[in-house]
């Protein structure tokens, strides 16, 4: 059996045994794809490339298939690869890498994705990843047919996007003095040349880039640089501890809206694809409730509460991006369609909750565009004690939705609170990326876990060619005892979220405001 992950749409094998040493690549193959495949063949297989030998001919047809469709026909005297676009050819190349890594027989296959949006998210706000390490992650995403790279560029703990208009964001905001209770400094950002370099790197692999600048929450790194962005102009520091913070951008100041638009302008200059992510999750309203500016804005708009004010904030920025030809993605926050204000219909909502959250199914059924990043299976930063390989394969994108056509997109997320370098990223990614890529490409309705397991040992050996050693089964599918201790170890994160400090700080701020009002 020829083993391929993600599973192809259809494949028929025959008894023809194909033997050769040399491979000749011919036909409609882009220069980049040709070099990529030649390099793989030369460095990672027993074959070598030449002008003669077993011919693999690539053909771009004018047929009316989707842009990622391709077919491969392997016979004794040669192989024919057909597609309708260069993108389809590139997807075929990633399949060929697996095919050429196992014994060959004659076969014909046809393949295309079930889902057109297959995202991979990398958070570099918590821990900075070098350009080389980001490229490594992108290589793995391309190898398993992801077609969107969601780049989470800012966080409370670090601002990684160079801004010409607001230079303090990287002069100050890209550095933190330590992490949690440690003493090691963490710093780094991408200048505009490096950002463009990553965009080009993705585009060569037919991956579109979705940059994310979090607004209005998760912005301590920006508030530390420009205190006037906050509600009370307090002197703040780039966060050193994980967890949700109380200080967020002020929604009542004109400067906040000017700042956000300026940053989005710079973002759009570099990131030329259609989507921009503006975050929006975990924005506690502790400061807004105390803020005169936010309360004045709430009254001016005739809104009922601060949650509605955040919806206004998101809609305002989405309208601004729409005028620039961009579509906005936000993290899903609960809302009621009957409220005074709801998210614009054009905004794409990204869901990160658990499989028990049936509320989101109702949002999907309403016809809104949604991306599912179901944290029960697709959050690969979590230890295997939380999300096993079994979980990643068998998690439903949205509970209560059987028609996956109703789901706009699928995305797996690699947050980095506990994934501080690319070595740990590889450990967390594989083998879960095998499973997730198959669900995203082949579709939930085509799941076959037993068949997937039959391919797993081959995939483990295949990915070793790319400097990845998959952990043993007892780690990625742990038993009850290992699960318990894995969760226990991970729950130490609760100790470094500064909950007590934040509440004391909030209490002191309330007292200060109350005393000022008395005067």
Image (spheres, rainbow, N blue to C red):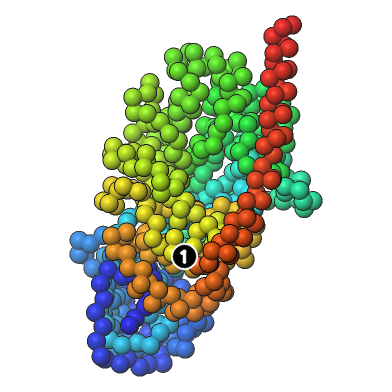
Q: Is residue 157 left or right of residue 84?
A: right
Residue sitting at x 52%, y 17%: 297
What is the residue that sits farthest to the right in this orientation? Answer: 183
Other-residue count near label 1 (Cα within 10 Å), few / some / many at <14 / 14–19 / ≥20 = many
Q: Which residue is mark 1?
A: 389
Seen from the viewer's position, the closer of residues 113 and 21 is 113
Residue 39's place in the image compared with 6, above or below, is: below
Q: Is residue 230 left or right of residue 270?
A: right
Q: In which quadrant of the rendered image does the N terminus lie?
A: bottom left
Q: Is residue 189 visible?
A: no
Q: In which quadrant of the rendered image does the C terminus lie?
A: top right
Residue sitting at x 43%, y 53%: 411
Residue 465's place in the image compared with 327, above or below, is: below
Residue sitting at x 37%, y 31%: 344
Which quadrant holds residue 221? top right
Seen from the viewer's position, the closer of residues 357 and 459 is 357
What is the residue that sits farthest to the top in this orientation? Answer: 519
What is the residue that sits farthest to the front in this orientation? Answer: 481
Task: Count up the numbered dots.
Answer: 1
How far across and down, in percent of the image, does residue 384 sit? 54, 62
Seen from the viewer's position, the closer of residues 152 and 3 is 3
Which quadrant holds residue 173? top right
Seen from the viewer's position, the closer of residues 33 and 118 is 118
């Amino acid at each position: 059996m020829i083993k391929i992950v993600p599973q192809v749409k259809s494949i028929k094998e025959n008894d023809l045994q194909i033997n050769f040493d040399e491979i000749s690549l011919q036909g409609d193959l882009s220069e980049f794809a040709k070099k990529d495949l030649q390099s793989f063949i030369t460095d990672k297989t027993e074959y070598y490339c030449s002008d003669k030998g077993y011919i693999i001919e690539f053909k771009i047809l004018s047929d009316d298939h989707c842009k990622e469709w391709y077919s491969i026909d392997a016979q004794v005297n040669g192989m024919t690869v057909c597609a309708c676009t260069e993108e389809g050819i590139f997807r075929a190349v990633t399949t060929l890498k697996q095919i050429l890594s196992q014994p060959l027989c004659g076969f014909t296959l046809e393949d295309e994705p079930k889902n057109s949006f297959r995202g991979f998210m990398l958070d570099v706000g918590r821990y900075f990843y070098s350009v080389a390490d980001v490229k490594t992650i992108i290589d793995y995403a391309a190898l398993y047919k992801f077609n969107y790279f969601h780049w989470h560029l800012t966080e409370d703990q670090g601002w990684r996007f160079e801004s010409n208009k607001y230079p303090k964001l990287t002069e100050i905001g890209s550095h933190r003095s330590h992490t949690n209770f440690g003493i090691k400094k963490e710093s780094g950002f991408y200048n505009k040349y490096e950002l463009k370099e990553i965009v080009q790197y993705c585009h060569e692999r037919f991956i579109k880039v979705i940059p994310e600048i979090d607004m209005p929450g998760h912005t301590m790194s920006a508030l530390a640089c420009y205190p006037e962005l906050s509600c009370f102009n307090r002197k703040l520091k780039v966060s050193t501890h994980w967890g949700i913070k109380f200080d967020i951008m002020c929604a009542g100041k004109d400067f906040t809206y000017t700042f956000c638009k300026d940053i989005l302008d710079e973002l759009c200059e570099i990131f030329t694809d259609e989507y921009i992510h503006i975050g929006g999750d975990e924005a506690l309203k502790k400061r807004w409730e105390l803020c005169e500016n936010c309360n004045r804005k709430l009254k001016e708009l005739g809104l009922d509460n601060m949650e509605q004010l955040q919806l206004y904030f998101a809609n305002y920025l989405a309208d601004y991006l729409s005028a620039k030809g961009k579509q906005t993605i936000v993290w899903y926050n609960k809302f009621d369609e009957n409220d005074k204000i709801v998210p614009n219909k054009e905004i794409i909502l990204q869901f990160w909750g658990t499989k028990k959250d049936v509320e989101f199914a109702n949002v999907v059924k309403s016809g809104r565009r949604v991306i599912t990043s179901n944290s029960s299976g697709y959050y690969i930063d979590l230890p295997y004690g939380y999300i096993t390989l079994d979980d990643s394969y068998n998690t439903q994108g949205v509970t209560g939705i059987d028609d996956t056509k109703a789901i706009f997109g699928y995305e797996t997320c690699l947050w980095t609170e506990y994934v501080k370098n690319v070595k740990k990223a590889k450990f967390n990614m594989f083998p879960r990326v095998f499973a997730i890529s198959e669900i995203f490409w082949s579709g939930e309705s085509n799941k076959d876990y037993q068949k997937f397991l039959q391919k797993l040992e081959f995939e483990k050996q295949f990915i070793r060619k790319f400097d990845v050693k998959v952990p043993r089964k007892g780690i990625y599918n742990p038993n009850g005892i290992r699960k318990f201790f894995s969760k226990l170890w991970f729950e130490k994160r609760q100790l470094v979220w500064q909950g007590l400090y934040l509440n004391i700080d909030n209490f002191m701020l309330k007292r200060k405001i109350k005393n000022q009002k008395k005067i």
